[in-house]
């Protein structure tokens, strides 16, 4: 069985797209006219008050599922 690692890609000269998104990236894409890019006001408010890793932030603060974080082993590199 061969394992694969997620990686970013170069879409054009001097542009590298990462294999993950950031909260900053979500905020930059905010567009209320496009459903997939309409960032809720609650997330805007949380973004203005904190700067932490995107997935953990969403799980804990936005989705209200902080109990899931208690089941994880979080390693900071």
Image (cartoon, rainbow, N blue to C red):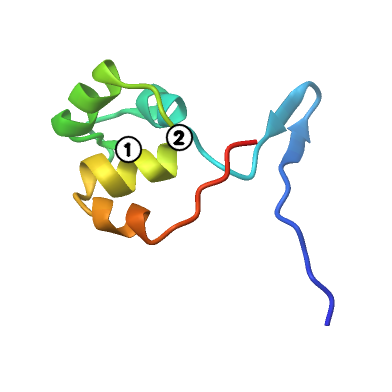
Counting residues from the start of the chain, the first of labels 2 and 1 encountered is: 1
Number of the front mark, 2 or 1: 2
Say which residue appears at 72% left-offset and 26% top-offset. Answer: 15
Quadrant the C terminus occupies = top right
User: From the viewer's perspective, is residue 23 above or below residue 61?
Assistant: above
| Distance (Cα) linking label 2 and label 1 | 19 Å
- In this rendered view, identify the residue nearer to me: 19 or 54: 54
* SS category of the residue bearing label 2: loop
In the orientation shown, which residue stands out farthest toward the left?
41
User: From the viewer's perspective, is residue 72 above or below residue 51?
Assistant: below
Residue 35 at least partly seen? no
Left or right: 67 in relation to 73: left
Left or right: 5 in relation to 44: right
Say which residue appears at 26% left-offset and 57% top-offset. Answer: 67
Say which residue appears at 48% left-offset and 33% top-offset. Answer: 22
Left or right: 20 in relation to 13: left
Residue 65 at least partly seen? yes
Residue 13 spot, x, y in % from top left: 81, 24
Quadrant the N terminus occupies = bottom right
Identify the residue position indicated by label 1 in the image.
37
Identify the residue position indicated by label 2 in the image.
53
Residue 40 spot, x, y in % from top left: 18, 35
**Counting other residues with Cα less than 10 Å from the Cα at mark 1, is it few (<14), some (14-19), or many (20 or more)?**
some
Examine the image and state in which quarter residue 26 appears: top left
**Counting other residues with Cα less than 10 Å from the Cα at mark 2, is it few (<14), some (14-19), or many (20 or more)?**
few
């Amino acid at each position: 069985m061969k394992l694969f690692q997620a990686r970013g890609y170069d879409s054009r000269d001097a542009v590298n797209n990462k294999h993950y998104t950031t909260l900053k990236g979500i905020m930059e894409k905010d567009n209320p006219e496009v459903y997939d890019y309409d960032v809720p006001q609650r997330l805007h408010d949380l973004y203005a008050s904190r700067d932490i890793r995107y997935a953990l932030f969403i799980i804990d603060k936005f989705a209200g599922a902080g109990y899931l974080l208690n089941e994880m082993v979080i390693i900071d590199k």
